[in-house]
Image (cartoon, helix red, strand yellow):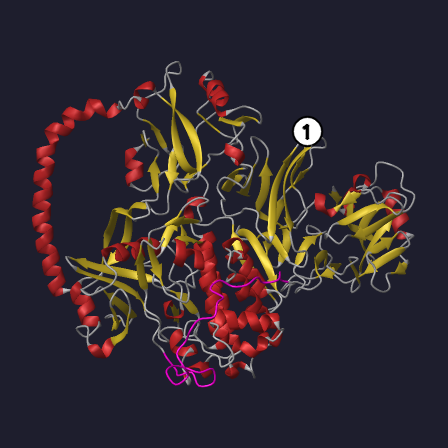
Amino acid sequence: MEKPAESFPFPILLVISSCLFLVPISGQSDTITSSQSLKDGQTIVSSSGTFELGFFSPPNSLYRYVGIWYKATDRTPVWVANRQAPLRNKNGILRIIHPAGVLAILDTSSKRIVWSTDASTRPVINPVAELLETGNLVVRDRDDENPENFLWQSFHYPTNTLLAGMKLGKNLTSGLEMYLSSWKSVDDPSPGDYTYHCDSSGYPQDILRKGAKVVYRSGPWNGLHWSGAPNMVNNTMTSFNLVMNKDEIYYIYELANKSVISTLVVNPDGDTGRRTWVDKTRSWQNYHSVKADDCDTYGMCGAYGTCNVLDSPVCQCLDKFVPRHQEDWERVDWSAGCVREAALNCTGDGFLKYAGVKLPDTNISRYNETMSLDECQSVCAKNCSCMAYSSLDVRNGGSGCLLWMGDLVDTRQLSEDGQEIYIRMAHSALLGGSAKTSRRQIVTVGLPLIIAAVLVSLVFGTIFCFRKRRMSPKITNNVFAAQNYKESSGGRHSEDLDLPQFDLYTLTLATDQFSIHNKIGEGGFGPVYKGVLEGGQEIAVKRLSEASKQGLREFKNEVICIAKLQHRNLVKLLGCYIQGEETMLVYEYMPNKSLDMFIFDEEQSGLLDWPKRSNIINGIARGLMYLHQDSRLRIIHRDLKTSNILLDIEMNPKISDFGMARSFGGSETGANTVRVVGTYGYMSPEYAIDGIFSIKSDVFSFGVLVLEIISGKKNRHFVHPDHHLNLLGHAWTLYNDNRSLELVDTKLIDSCDPAEVTQSIHVALLCVQQSPDDRPNMSSIVWMLRNECILPEAKPPGFFTERRVPSTDEHYSWSTQNPSSINDVTITLLDAR
């Protein structure tokens, strides 16, 4: 516990007032003894210099607080002692009170205790306060370093930040709960509206509350991750775990690399997520938020409703359920949820399997860690209050039993291959019967009238639309239906995508009748034109040509993949036009066109100094990380190359051209295909040769991109007088000889940071390693590019072989490579294996 001054008895205050004049802390120490005091302006530092403790004031505040922060950062506190009792001056001191073993903040001007820890319940001979290398501030006996005997520790009383090794949960013996609470504002560290808990009232799950109201829930732990957070799995940077025993239940994470500065923070507005300190920019960067989209809002669709960001509206009833109040659902009020079409009768009920969902709220649940799934079903069937069951642990084929003893709330759709839940159903529903049977006569009688009404509506609608098109060429919000579109490898999409649809008149007017003067590019899809809408907005119109190497398949694929994605490093799709054989996509216009037109051009390349190229590399990495990890649909681009990286007015990169992309759900990260698509020079070996593609295929392409951006040379057309290696082989050779800087474009010499460039080359070589298993994932790459750290040794790259190239008279030379803005064509190979 922590106490304000008013709660302390008078005798202790007398002891304090007689001990104000103590020896101040001198030098770099990590400890405060009972004969020392820490004054405002002084600090103590953990043994290896990671954490620092001292007095501070928040921005725009004169109040003084005692806090802990990472010493290498901007002093953003990760823990605050007197968050509810600030000092109004700089007369505060921090000291240990002996023999009580109390750590206290004193205001020497008023001779009062501002804040303190509890007094020890056992005798203390020589109490000290020590700042550990973990960031934990502990009070202990000087001669007893056993953590179990600590008198008090800050890790038991977190504020708004969860550090590595800190527990989020509850001690079942003492009843002490360790949870996070937001600051009231950026200027006020007192407890705010939001709290973040590992809730153990049922089967454990993380929850975010605003006051007493739950606003976010992670889903129950499934042995690998929280059910509703499939991307928060162990990776090269972070490992996560849930610990449950008779004494405590808690969630904890650890950092694999101790030099990484990364924390989980609850912000004053409730935004909760992981942030990482970036040395290069001297700033905190948001790594991810626990709430990925609107479907992570707790209980949005009510009981037995399910949320899917790809649906419109996002809330639907689970199969075999109907809205409780249809009128409310039509008004987009889903709070009342859904009810079964056929009512339960307990004795004859069975269970229906639902796949790929975030498991419902486990607040009212029971669990058993040893039962099989069949035993779990038997137990649930015998209890009329049991509404559903599922495996407790998904590892090794599944084990354990989780039972829901009430309505199922806060379910969302994640993927077809996500977790499974078995929901109690009436016998008639399982046999295919439906409560809708009694309505057949009504439907039969009403059907002719409905058809007649639809036909009349179509006639008048056609006349109205025709007149509107002629009189006022505007954008209309229509639904682009990409139904039952099936990839050759077996992927299936069946969604109605809300996408603005432009009319032909608007696009013809905007592009000056698709004038050759407005043509800004040509790709596998067809020509691309610049256009200007009536309001002055600039657009890029991609028009499917009759001779296109791509077709309706790629058109639909691009819309499906990108329509629902929103990220600053992805090109934004504004709408489309579909009429017969004529199909067009409308994008935001990128005034600087594509990356290849800069880095491979002798004059233009000079406009991209190292800071700009570094920003482009990092932006592409962030965009790919979003596609692979943070978007609800896991997207593999499959055709990442310089011509598919567009640049906005500030030279920020935007990944474009998703015609070849593939989407996955859940834990899927790749597949096989007999239809290999992509561009030579960027394709990974396993994809080009065997048709095996995965997120690691994109990582390989990214590595090639980085080497091209740094060198200003193309991988495939690279020629060197001393060998016949491609760019990857040349970079690898220089890396082995500790001569990586020789790869750098000569135009970067004056602007580059040698250490940054060398590290970027090293990261790129890790990306292009022969084996996909050796390549890092994009989240690790983003971190490695931002932070100075020790990287693993790179293994030989894929396609690291000498090849015959034309003589320098026929083609290019190392010193006189001709500028080129024409990329290698996109290719399609059938039966690659």
Looking at the image, residue 602 lies above or below residue 563? below
- Measuring from the top left, give residue 703's x and y in whole percent: 49, 65
State which region is magenta: 791-820
Q: Which residue sits at x=41%, y=62%? A: 683
Question: In this rendering, does residue 152 appear at all?
Answer: yes
Q: Is residue 96 magenta?
A: no
Residue 796 shown left or right of residue 456 in the figure: right
Nearest the viewer among 608 and 34 is 608
Q: Which residue is mark 1?
A: 246
Q: Main secondary structure of the magenta part?
A: loop
Tell me the SS state at disc 1. Answer: loop
Nearest the viewer among 810 and 441 is 810
Q: Is residue 815 magenta?
A: yes
Question: In this rendering, does residue 636 appear at all?
Answer: no
- Measuring from the top left, give residue 193's x and y in whole percent: 56, 47
Residue 105 shown left or right of residue 238 in the figure: right
Q: Which residue sits at x=42%, y=28%? A: 422
Q: How many marks?
A: 1
Image quadrant holding the N terminus, namely: top right
- Measuring from the top left, give residue 376's x and y in whole percent: 49, 22
Amino acid type of the residue tagged 1 in the rendering: Lys
Residue 83 shown left or right of residue 761 in the figure: right
